[in-house]
Image: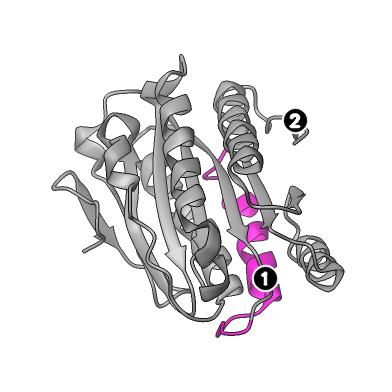
């Protein structure tokens, strides 16, 4: 069971990915519509110098979202990845996301299974949206993939991520899906070019590149993420996605 799940969440399998996901049971939901927020965080060895800052970023995102007028319509899922995936918690109502839970939550590991993590993020959001739709809940989604490097451990390819994003649209289970690839601590132009290519090959909505990973810059990232979540949630019911925001 993921680290921060509770009895209101249940496990679900995915046909395209060996790693499934968990999500809040439909019979415990009280609103009519939800924005599904997924944060996928790289915890490979190279992020060790700014691990604490990343955890502070997660806390800031949760804090900002809890103050949103749309807080009751948000569910958050957090996944950490190195050469394997680890769901920290599944799609939880924001009221069950406690700030202290994110202190020390990222465990630094090995290499980088970026494609596997990204594909799982998109497929899990799509699959849960199908389940929500069957229960007469409306849904849209926003996915953030935070990484500082290139894939070197995945079993899947960039094409699999592209297929997952395409399937999210054709499934018609999500009113819209915004996908944001975030390169953190990217000072090497080779890494930046690689992530730009991945964004184009997979079809992410937006790519954001951050040269440094200090407290000030990651606080700015937290603000960008929380504003993007708010915009996507407010777009639910309009028939389309929110506009991309400037970092």
Q: Position of residue 207 (x, y in %)?
A: 76, 51
Query: Which residue, as the protein is rendered here, is positioned at the far top?
Result: 69
Q: Position of residue 181 (x, y in %)?
A: 68, 54
Q: Nearer the viewer, residue 110 or 144?
A: 110
Q: Position of residue 231 (x, y in %)?
A: 62, 25
Splitting the image into 4 quarters, where does residue 246 fall? top right
Question: Which residues are drawn in magenta?
Answer: 152-175
Q: Look at mark 1 in the image and give the residue it sits on.
A: 149
Where 104 sits versus 175, above or below?
A: below
Spatial CA span between label 1 and label 2: 27 Å
Task: Report the quarter where the N terminus lies.
Answer: bottom left
Q: How many marks?
A: 2
Q: Secondary structure at mark 2?
A: loop
Q: Residue at x 50, y 66 (%)?
A: 48
Q: Residue at x 40, y 42 (%)?
A: 76
Where 240 sits versus 203, above or below?
A: above
- The answer to whether residue 32 is visible is no
> Would you say residue 60 sits in the magenta stretch?
no
Q: Position of residue 221 (x, y in %)?
A: 63, 40
Circle 2 residues within 10 Å: few <14, some 14–19, many ≥20:
few
- The answer to whether residue 119 is visible is yes
Q: Look at mark 2 in the image and give the residue it sits on.
A: 243
> Would you say residue 157 sits in the magenta stretch?
yes
Where 171 sits versus 162, above or below?
A: above
Left or right: where 25 falls relative to 55: left
Task: Report the quarter where the C terminus lies.
Answer: top right
Q: Nearer the viewer, residue 61 or 236?
A: 61
Tag 1 and tag 2, C-beta contact below 8 Å: no
């Amino acid at each position: 069971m993921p680290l921060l799940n509770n009895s209101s969440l249940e496990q679900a399998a995915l046909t395209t990915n060996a790693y499934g996901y968990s999500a809040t049971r439909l019979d415990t939901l009280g609103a009519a519509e939800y924005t599904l927020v997924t944060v996928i965080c790289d915890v490979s060895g190279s992020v060790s110098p700014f691990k604490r800052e990343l955890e502070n970023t997660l806390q800031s995102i949760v804090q900002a979202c809890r103050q949103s007028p749309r807080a009751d319509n948000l569910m958050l899922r957090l996944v950490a990845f190195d050469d394997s995936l680890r769901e920290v918690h599944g799609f939880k109502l924001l009221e069950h996301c406690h700030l202290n839970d994110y202190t020390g939550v990222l465990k630094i590991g090995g290499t980088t299974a970026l494609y596997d993590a990204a594909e799982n993020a998109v497929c899990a959001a799509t699959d849960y949206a199908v389940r929500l739709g069957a229960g007469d809940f409306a849904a849209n989604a926003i996915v953030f993939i935070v990484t500082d490097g290139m894939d070197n451990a995945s079993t899947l390819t960039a094409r699999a991520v592209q297929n997952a994003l395409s399937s999210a649209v054709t499934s018609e289970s999500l009113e819209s899906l915004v996908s944001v690839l975030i390169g953190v601590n990217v000072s090497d132009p080779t890494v930046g070019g690689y992530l730009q290519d991945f964004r184009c090959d997979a079809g992410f909505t937006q790519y954001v590149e951050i040269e440094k990973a200090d407290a000030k810059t990651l606080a700015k990232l937290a603000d960008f993420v929380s504003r993007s979540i708010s915009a996507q949630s407010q777009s639910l019911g309009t028939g389309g996605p929110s506009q991309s925001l400037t970092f």
